Amino acid sequence: MPQVLVPTVCPYCGAGCQFFISVEKERATGIEYMPEHPASEGALCSKGNASLEVLYHQDRLRYPLKKTGDGWARISWHEAQELIVRGLGGALKKFGPERVGFLSSSKCTNEENYLIEKLARCLGSKNIDNCARLCHAPSVVGLNRTLGAAGMTNPIPDLANSKCVFIIGSNLAENHAILSRWINRAKDEGAVVIVADPRMTHTAWMADIFLQLKPGTDVALLNGLAHVIIKEGLIDKDYIAKLTRGYDELVEAVKDYSPEKVSEITGVPADDIIRAARAYAISPTSAILYSMGITQHCTGTDNVQAIANLALISGNLGKPGSGVMPLRGQNNVQGACDMGALAEFYPGYKKADDPETARFFSAGWGRGSLPVGRGLTATEMIDAAGKGDIKAMYIVGEDPMNSDPSSNHTHDALEKLDFLVVQDIFMTATAQMADVVLPAAVWAEKEGTYTSTERRVQWSRKAVSPPGEARSDLEIVCDVANHLGLDFDYPDAAAVLAEINRLVPQYGGITRERLDGMGLIWPCPDKDHPGTPILHSLGFKLQDGRASIMPVQYRAAAENASWDYPFILTTGRVAVHHNAGSMTRRSPSLIEREPELFVEINTNDAARLKIADGDEVLVTSLRGETSARARLTDKVKKGVVFMPFHFSGTNKLTTEVTDPEARIPEFKVSACKISWRD
Ligand code: SF4
């Protein structure tokens, strides 16, 4: 049988790189690169290159399972559905839909996310969310409020047109590696690169100006930059007058953020704050990129608004080489949000608390009535389960046991559920807690669309069949819906996309027929529309077409170092692993390079504690403890330690405190102590 090349979208980060899977005798045998792809130009990072390693892994779930007294028993799909009708359907009847929760997956396609949120809402539950709650919920809240849209404003290749690239809270050189190519291209043309991060990351090595701030002081730094720009008259007066509101309030709000005062708060030298502000504001085109170093704070929404303020006062929106670029972590976290797998929004960011939204989808879906109002977020559902207020959950492709803060708290909460069904590709720590586990197909075993961080909607094809009796999430969700009395009659992803085209205005023209190439960038309202690579070039979709400058004040992080817990733990990613690690920890070539949990400790702190490089140490916070291998380094400053969150121990330590608006946990600042492992 000849070799066939099947185009596919990388299952890891939101950069959306495409490549070909070579298939021989119905088996994936290798990767071929795709040089014509606009964002990746044929390149892949280590994760993309290793992505096929999970396909035939021995740990793949192959059959539905039910928990027995002493382990797991293989069951038929029929029995699994009966158990779900009894468990989930029973909870809906007995306790009401408000006490049942659904977690959708940013690893699933748009069509699958759309169906999962539709399932939840058609069953009457408002409690639907996805892991964007743990990464970019503040972008959704903060950018919708200030700019009227939460997506990345400019496409990835446009970075090459930038004359100043300001990266804050993002280690993109490791986590969105493909973007480095475009930034280096801008640098070759003379662009200034500014990086702000508590850690000297691989990304920081690209910087002309590196601002090593204390964890949790981003608002102070961003307000300090705004202060300098305003004081030195580097603002774009015309842009402010024509396209914004709220400038005078910002002038008042940042007047006390002198470089000297900001230096005291952030630890960044005052001269560097001034240099960075001038470089950003004087450059004809400046782009700001950020990621979870900005969002995963109890001030995440404030951080995002402070970023938008900088772009607005310097007129750096709506034109090539500029913009605000929130880098989405998971391959389809943008799409999961677009599809309404969020507590606050139905598909297309229609507000869940607006009765007109429910009426619109009630008519579109042919349902009598749909719930109105904001549901519980992902972390609120876990809290509610712990209190006995949520009784049953359906979790698709998420692993809260590893990805949520304070894992012991998550464990106790999930244990209290009357019924838990988990649908995944591996037996994750969360699946271990389930009553029923459903085996799902991985990306290469199904078809559908994914929306990358640059809002590019791309069709990914099925290359091979799933193992055993595993099925696509789309098939499973339709089957669950139909067993629970709904009528989900979708033969394939294209049929779901056709409904999305009808009901989600941003996707109106993104039809299956138009997706055989490099995709389309939303908003794309009709089938003749070319897509919109640059947002806001014609003003803003807010009152009078103007953006809102929304001043914010610096608030300290929820936890500070203390006598008992003298270090600040900040968390993040490393190049060869991804998120909760369920896939990368099972990739032989990746786990070999980074096999275990480590903690980076400043060399001076380590010397004081008499810890040597490679020692196994105990890291303890108020919420739990974990062992980790000590890595001595000057990448982190004294008093700060760093741990990657791809291994199960890290989130035993992190705090459950959340941003009051976006409800994202403050993963980036937790007090801890380091001691010897007995
Ligand atoms: Fe995959 Fe992201 Fe790496 Fe591209 S940069 S290959 S999308 S993980």
Image: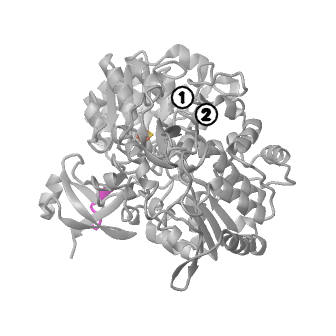
Is residue 660 something one can see in this rendering? Answer: no
Is residue 521 found inside the magenta-colored segment of the image?
no
Residue that extends furthest to the front in the rendered view of this protein:
1
Q: Residue 559 in the image: x percent, y percent?
A: 39, 58
Horizontal side, residue 639 vs residue 223: left or right: left
Q: In terms of depth relative to the viewer, which is nearer, 76 or 38?
A: 76
Label 1: element kind: loop
Type of amino acid at the residue the image marks with label 2: Ala
Label 2: element kind: loop
Q: In terms of depth relative to the viewer, which is nearer, 519 or 154?
A: 519
Which quarter of the image is occupied by the C terminus? bottom left
Ligand 1 positioned in quadrant? top left
Q: Residue 438 in the image: x percent, y percent?
A: 60, 65
Dividing the picture into quadrants, the one containing residue 190 is top left
Horizontal side, residue 496 vs residue 34: left or right: right
Residue that carries the numbered disc 1 in the rendered image? 153
Q: Which residues are magenta?
A: 564-569
Label 1 Cα neighbours within 10 Å, binned few <14 / some 14-19 / many ≥20 = many
Q: Residue 398 in the image: x percent, y percent?
A: 53, 58
Horizontal side, residue 356 vs residue 626: left or right: right
Type of amino acid at the residue the image marks with label 1: Thr
Q: Which residue is located at x 32 percent, y 25 percent?
A: 184
Q: Marks 1 and 2: CB-CB under 8 Å?
A: yes
Q: Which mark is residue 149?
A: 2
Q: Which residue is located at x 66 percent, y 53 percent?
A: 474
